[in-house]
Image: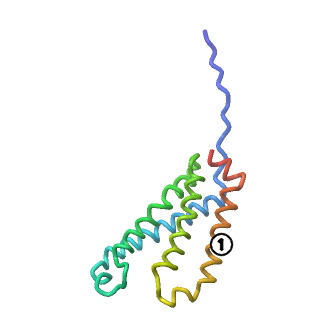
Amino acid sequence: MTEVIVEPTAAKPGRPFWLSVLAVLFLLLVAAGWLRFAEAWRFWDLLAKFAEKPGPLYLLLGGAAWGLAGLPAAIGLWFGWRWAIRVAWIAAVFYPLTYWLDRLLIDRAPQALTAWPFSLVVTLLWLGFVFINLRSRNAQRFCR
């Protein structure tokens, strides 16, 4: 009779608290994107009539992009999938990049530039928070 030797596998470590927070933050950005999408769809006629260029299609597509961008990152980080950290980096850079491109190239209202120092600080805090969390040993170990 053949004896089967089963070696114990290393248990997957628990999800780090700050990685959970990061996943939830991604979900909040996803929700904001889908809310923008829904509101652009709902008020399409009003936006087409009164809004300046680029119009409701831009708002709709931008909302969908934000809604889709962070979803794989949030789910992947929550479950600790191997590819999650790479996808989270892409999504983490995508959000501020699109925000600043929109703010600097599309939104030409003078009021859009009044609070730029605050927006810059929030952007740097976001990127720093993502960097620290995704580079942490606990996050690296959890997403194997």
**Mark 1: which amino acid?**
Leu
Residue under the image location 37 percent in, 78 percent down: 54
Q: Nearer the viewer, residue 131 or 138?
A: 131
Q: Nearer the viewer, residue 91 or 82?
A: 91
Q: Position of residue 125 (x, y in %)?
A: 66, 72
Q: Is residue 12 left or right of residue 70?
A: right
Above or below, comparing residue 129 to residue 50 in the picture: above
The residue lying furthest to the top in this view is: 1
Q: Can you tell which quarter of the image residue 117 is in? A: bottom right
Above or below, comparing residue 121 to residue 31 in the picture: below
Q: Is residue 108 left or right of residue 122?
A: left
Residue under the image location 36 percent in, 85 percent down: 52
Label 1, on which residue?
Answer: 124
Quarter of the picture containing the N terminus is top right
Crowd band around label 1 with a 10 angstrom C-alpha radius: few (<14), some (14–19), many (20+): few
Q: Position of residue 113 (x, y in %)?
A: 55, 86
Q: Is residue 5 left or right of residue 31?
A: right
Q: Position of residue 45 (x, y in %)?
A: 27, 81
Residue under the image location 59 percent in, 49 percent down: 80
Residue under the image location 58 percent in, 86 percent down: 115
Q: Position of residue 118 (x, y in %)?
A: 62, 82
The residue lying furthest to the front in this view is: 105
Total count of labels: 1
